[in-house]
Image (cartoon, grey):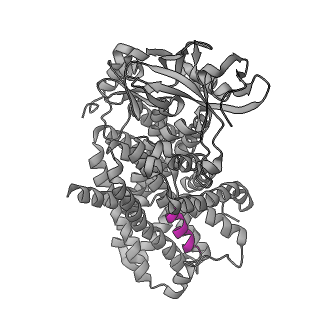
Amino acid sequence: MSGKEIDIGLHVLDHQLLDKDGRRCGNVDDLAIEGGVGEVPEVVAILCGPGYWGQRAGIIGRLASRIGGGRKVRVPWSDVGKVDSAVELKRGATEIGLGRGDDRLRPYVDKIPGAGR
Amino acid sequence: MRTLSSFLRREVVTESGRSLGRCHDLRGELSATNLRVTGLCIGRRALLEHLGIRAQKPQAIVPWEAIVRIEGKRIIVRDDAAAP
Amino acid sequence: MSKVLGLGLGIIAAIGGFVDIGDLVFNVAAGATFGYQLLWVIVVGLIGIIVYSEMCGRVAAVSGRAVFDAIRERVGFKGAVVALVSSEVVNLMTLAAELGGVAIALQLLSGLPYRWLIVFAVVAFAVVIWVTTFEWIERIFGFGGLCMLVFAVVTVKLGPDWGKVGAGFVPHIAHTNRVLYAYFVVGILGTAMTPYEVYFYSSGGIEDQWSPKDLGLNRANAILGYGLGGTLSFALMITGGALFLSHGISPQHLGTVALAAEQPLGQVGLLLALVGILFAVGAASIDTVFAGAYNLAQFCGWEWGRYRNPRGAPRFALTWLVLLVLALGILMTGVDPVALTEYAVLFSVVALPLTYVPILLVANDKAYMGRYVNGRFANALGLIYLVVIMIVALAAIPLMILTNVGQN
């Protein structure tokens, strides 16, 4: 058994997500756990995106979720490489579906000179 | 499927009705391939202890196996779960 | 060797960039109203910002997380949303006030109409930040801001009663007009302990990839940078006291502040003062707009960074652009930047506990900080300032109302 004991809320929840190139692509907004009473429960996915903010903070969270656009991305735990001060993923952000806001904005940003200095 | 956030701040009560406190985190075991959940962390750390003025109480952990059922706003555990 | 150079540059940037429009407004006005009696409050504020920044820098170096990340992780999501919204509102007010100050300085230098210069200033900043690397921005504005040292020269040349100046460093309560005195205490503390400075500083630490071995650098940076920069605040208050108090002049306009340098030093003094104000307040504008963008980006998990180019962090770039546009909108309503400054400082004082308390908690959390947790000395200071901040936060709005925003 080579497991390291951690407090999941402290060490994973709300931490930065980094893709395989070190690109920031979201925070761990929530975690999906499967396996209930009487079974061995496991964290099966990272839930990322404003769509998951509603369940974190009641009415304030739902409002923030609406303003943020309500996107939801589910990252299977199998994509997780290292859990450190940030959670490092094994694949690229675009592959997983993260960081889309930046990707969609980039072509417009590129149109303005000086964007790539 | 549950979310981590759905566990947080839920009150943890024994079958006989004694309240052990609130769940403020989940204890887990991280390996190269997966993250298992092994227990509940009970009781908010008091502000003064957090600031290091009083000695930190050891965290109470309720092992996952001690959970009897999860209902509404509470988590019911066996009477013999975590020592205070 | 380059660490020392980095520290040197950091200190120069801190001196030039320490003074912002809040310092200009409150310190000079305090001098003009109470003479040297409030000098001790500047000292209290300086120690406070050093304590606060050092903690945030240490959290950044040890945990790799900036202020807002730490707040979200430790205080919970709901608290983080509240902290985010309040800090963005205050940030935006501050940004508008700073940009207004820049426009006024430009007007005094060029004689062109104020409203045109607001637009010019915002557009110029947008272009500069978009196109220029931050290293250059820091150098230009840092060195330009050094012109503020003219006020230190002015202070000496005015030959104030140094005995009275010294007495001002001893904490005491005024004999008359206590409510107004309290208002200035709150204002001076508020303008010394600006939150945007702390967000900016700790985010910079993340980008510079501070690690535990940089903790000494962090401390030196905080103490020397703010300490030296703080002498300018002393100079402003002493100048206000020496020049304005006896004449009953209340500097409601930045021009009055700059004219203080003309008295003993002539046209050169005036020019240096205006240039210094332009660059110091300009640097503050940039720090503030970045701080606002950092907070949102860190909360949402976006890519961010002052050293990144816009295509590397598109949403971050869009955020600071939007903030600049919003600030422009606020200024175009014709609001007086000096009045706006007073509101911005007071509201930031009210919101200060929302970001100070979580950092104090995080700095004490062994799970987060390991052996770099707050020691007893740091905690003693941290707790004293917690009390100070809470008192000041509660007193700010009542005092603002009672004194009619310092008009009395």
Q: Nearer the viewer, residue C324 or C88?
A: C88
* Residue A2 picture quarter: top left
x and y percentages locating residue A102 in the rendered image: 38, 23
At 46% from the left and 35% from the top, the residue drawn is: C298
**Residue B16 in the image: above or below residue C155:** above
* Residue C107 picture quarter: bottom left
x and y percentages locating residue B42 in the rendered image: 64, 33
Question: Split into 4 quadrants, where in the image is the C terminus of chain C?
Answer: bottom right
x and y percentages locating residue C398 in the rendered image: 73, 57
Question: Split into 4 quadrants, where in the image is the N terminus of chain C?
Answer: bottom left
Let me know if residue C383 is in the magenta part. no
Can residue C346 be seen here? The reply is yes
Q: Nearer the viewer, residue A15 or C335?
A: A15
**Residue A81 in the image: above or below residue C143:** above
Q: Nearer the viewer, residue C158 or C180?
A: C180
Q: In the displayed image of the protein, which residue is found farthest to the front? A: B80
Q: Which residues are magenta?
A: C38-48
Asked if residue C295 lies left or right of residue C14, the reply is right
